[in-house]
Amino acid sequence: MSLRFVEGFKFTKIESPIHKLDPRSKFILTVGLFSTALMFTNLYVLFTVFLLQIPLILISKTTHRWLRSMKAGVWLGVFIFGMNLIFHTPLVLSIAFAVRLFAIMSAFSFFFMTTSADDLGLALDQIHVPYSISFTFTTAVRLVPTMAVDAQTVVDAQRSRGLELDKGNLTKRVRNYIPILIPLIISAIRRSVELAEALESRAFGATEHRTAIVTLKMHLADYVTIIGTILGLGLAIYVYFRVPLPTVIIPIQVPEINL
Amino acid sequence: MISVNNVNFRYPGASSDALTNVNLQIQNGEFVAIMGENGAGKTTLVKMFNGLLKPRAGSVSVDRVDTQDKSVAQLSRDVGLIFQNPDHQLFAETVSEELSFSLRNFGFDEEVIKRRVRNISTALDLERYLDSSPFILSGGERKRVALAAVLAWDPKHIIMDEPTIGQDYLQKDRLRNFIVQLISQGKTIVIVTHDVEFVAECKPRIVLLSKGTVIADDTASKILTDVEMLTKASLVRPQIAELMHQLPALGENPGIIDAYAAREFLIPRLRKADQTIESG
């Protein structure tokens, strides 16, 4: 089991027009893509939302890492598809739910790969989110790669004790993850307690009104991104309420699964 | 025997090799310390012994079985790897369950499991904690539980990654005695450590790694008195070796690194010096 898919959600400093965008405009774009993906269950729209992101990924020069996160999502996509089929969701809708997952995953992968935690924190501060909340959020983002390393170590440690994650039926395979999850949760709790104590020891929260050396400024590209997102979202809402969309017909009869 | 032949390894996405052309033979029943600076490739190397990592080039074999041909579970039956941080492996409700976990994975009978758990908990002074949660134990105790959890299935080769971190002096002394006991049972012991004082007391064969290559492979007495080599690996001489170095008037240091050898070396010389003073 490899946790390299986390690379698909990790910021790396690259010279690209997308990386230069203000985090607020990228956040609005991500929320726009996310909302559109949630709004529709139509396969054509969901595929469009997914495919729209590909040029952005190419421009941001993060294709390899994005592909890694998409690859990791395959099993989750298969799981969502399978569970929907089991619970009598029509085939096309089951596929749509899986595609929706990829569209949403891709949007967040794009956002986190191109936005540094520091910029994200600054953006939150500038929209007057309380510092304790913005700090918690950015710390959580920063800790994702560390947690991934921890998770890999836990997997290695348990495999060294004879644990075979891919052995047994579905129930057994799910249970195999208990020895992975518990140490991971415990070490995350320990780490957060230690971090909180270290922060308090370094006078965290002593100043009520913080100032920042760097101030984020919106540029033309940011305004274009925001206006484009708003127009796109507006179009999506219009289509949702007013335009009858063609439906995909798959001429396959899925056998009914009775539980 | 653990045999590492011309091994190269690079982590995915890394720009340089973690291990470059590493060759190493560890005989059965041998005691080896792998030392080196942070990021030298020590943990990477030992993770190859039970197949957690497979070489990109070259081969690693354990008892003449190539690690490429076996799963981690199969190799782990003979190679027990104890990780640095016990919190990365403890998960069960009780210490007893924790010690039984690997034994169940390896398919031991319940009777054998009970017996082994009892024996190993006695050997490592954990009996009173058998029904306690491993999470309420101190750092040193959790480390002992992690050690016991591996020793319970009686692997032929035991690899310990930084076993002395977080241990007080008494626990280190117990660990040293326990290692001696395991060696007397014919076990191969490999420790990965920065702890020069612990190594000086144990006197194993030392394999010194730096930047992914083996820069020295010799006795503890030779390596722990070789300042040039130690500096390359960001290590320092143990205190006894440093003291002997600071006393050049006593003659050439014959590779003394521990207190007992220093005592043997110093007493006749001090007596001689006393006699000279008295007669003079």
Image (tube, rainbow, N blue to C red):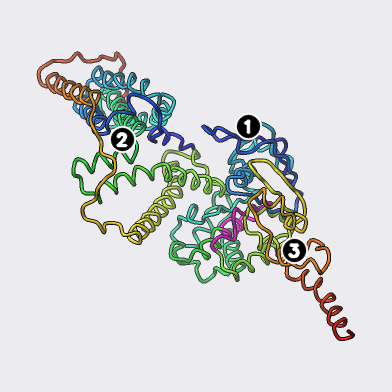
Give the residue at mark 2. A259
Q: Please report the residue visible at 34 percent of the width from the left and 57 percent of the height from the top.
A: A199
Q: Residue furthest bottom?
A: B278
Rendered location of residue A9, percent (x, y): 37, 34
Image quadrant of residue A38?
Answer: top left
Q: Is residue A82 above or below residue B136?
A: above
The residue positioned 20% from the left and 45% from the top of the image is: A129
Is B13 one of the magenta-colored residues? Answer: no
Which quadrant: the C terminus of chain A? top left
- At label 3, the amino acid type is His
Membership of B148 in magenta stretch: yes
Q: Chain of mark 3?
A: B
Q: Are marks 3 and 2 on the same chain?
A: no
Residue at mark 3? B245
Name which of mark 1 and mark 3 comes first in the sequence.
1
Residue A102 visible? The answer is: yes
